[in-house]
Image: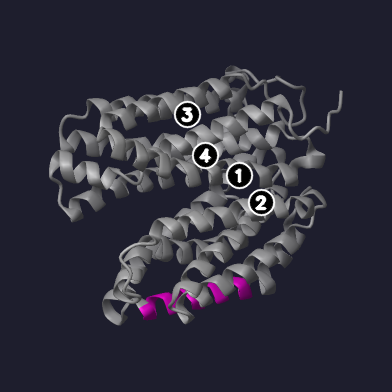
Amino acid sequence: MNTDRLWNADYCRVMAANFALFFAFYLLTPLLPLYLSEHFQASKDVIGLVLSGYTLTALLARPLSGFLVDTFPRKTVLMVCYFVFFIFFAGYLGAATLLLFAIVRTLHGAPFGALTVANSTMAIDVLPSSRRNEGIGYYGLSNNLAMAIAPTVSIAIYRLTGSFQLLFWLSLLTAFLGLMADAGVKGRQPGGSRGAEASPRSAMSKLPRLSLDRFFLLRGWVLGVNMVFCGFCFGVLSNYLAIYGKEVMGRSGGTGLYFALLSVGLIASRLQGAKALRQGLLVRNASEGMVISTVAYVLFVAVPNDVGYYGSALLLGLGNGHLWPAFQNMIIQMAHHNERGTANSTLLVSWDVGIGLGVLLGGIMAEHWGYTAAFWGVAASQVAAAAMFFASTRHAYRRGRVE
């Protein structure tokens, strides 16, 4: 038996579970504002408040989930997180009032945030060490495919049936299929045999002293700060793209095509960058991602026509597709075996913080100086992120890696 086989059964199951996780999520995402408006007659500010709760609880859950994944049996933590994530979709079906829906939606963010950490950590565990860099790169394809396919499927189903209830049931079913996929994972515990897990009693007896580095990988703080800059840029673009297109470029559509091209770029870069990841050329992959992303943001604001608009989408997908798996592998290599969950949550939390700052500060900049100035600010932030990477982050990684 080839122990270095990348596409082993456990890895395929974890990939399928991750696809189901994000497919269920993106089935609802594009139509929830419409549902809240039509079903509950919610105003725009209330819709924003209801939907933002999901992101907040996901952000708060991730550091804790990293600690749990690194402290208790990972398969157990994974299954609990996935079951809670799955069962919350039933809450949407039963939420008869806006307040109840808001509570369900807000609380649902916690298992989502925890599950993204637990599932990606399990993916790392079931990969042979010689194929880990490459495997993490391919793992992200399941996110990208779900992001590319699910919104299109969701909108098509709604146009055909006009039924939000059907979409809730489909999300519930998809999450259940993901839960079943993860249930079949045998697991490979670090330093142990396949399928070996410590007992809960043993885990409790070895419970580490609570400290900041159990929730945030202090060794990787430079990578985390660098990711905050990148998240900030994407947070502004993803949230204010449509209104920028309308007010600055005079276009009323095209947002869907923009994100479709971005997904194409993400998928293409994951496939193209697999060889470099397999060879361990993480810094090179990250460097290419930084440069391509910088060109994308500058092109977007400097060339306000179709060439700049859609060209930036493809380039941004290519840049992020190189950047994300490289950064994830880098921070994992700065963590010990029992810190992988913490390393994953550190990167995800940094990205979430950046996204949140982008949403907040992007609106403030646009209000005071206009959307063109706001997006020039984004381009400047991405230039700063690239400068930080070449001046500091890559050196911090080389100094701090433990594998």
- Residue at mark 4: 116
Answer above or below: position of 398 versus 49.
below
Left or right of 290, for residue 60:
left
Residue 391: x %, y % from top left? 68, 74
* Label 4 Cα crowd, 10 Å radius (few <14 / some 14-19 / many 20+): many
The reply to whether discs 1 and 2 touch (Cβ–Cβ < 8 Å) is yes
Residue 402: x %, y % from top left? 76, 50
Residue interval drawn in magenta: 372-387
3 or 2: mark nearer the eye: 2
- Residue at mark 2: 270
The reply to whether discs 1 and 3 touch (Cβ–Cβ < 8 Å) is no
The reply to whether discs 4 and 3 touch (Cβ–Cβ < 8 Å) is no
- Please tell me which of labels 3 and 2 falls first in the chain: 3
**Residue occupying image coordinates x 71% and y 60%:** 285
Q: Examine the structure image and report whether residue 340 is included in the region drawn in magenta.
A: no
Residue at the far front in the pictured view = 160
| Distance between the alpha carbons at the discs numbered 2 and 4 | 19 Å
| Distance between the alpha carbons at the discs numbered 1 and 3 | 22 Å
- Secondary structure category for the residue under label 2: helix
Residue 105: x %, y % from top left? 30, 38
- Please tell me which of labels 1 and 3 falls first in the chain: 3
- Secondary structure category for the residue under label 1: helix
- Please tell me which of labels 1 and 2 falls first in the chain: 1
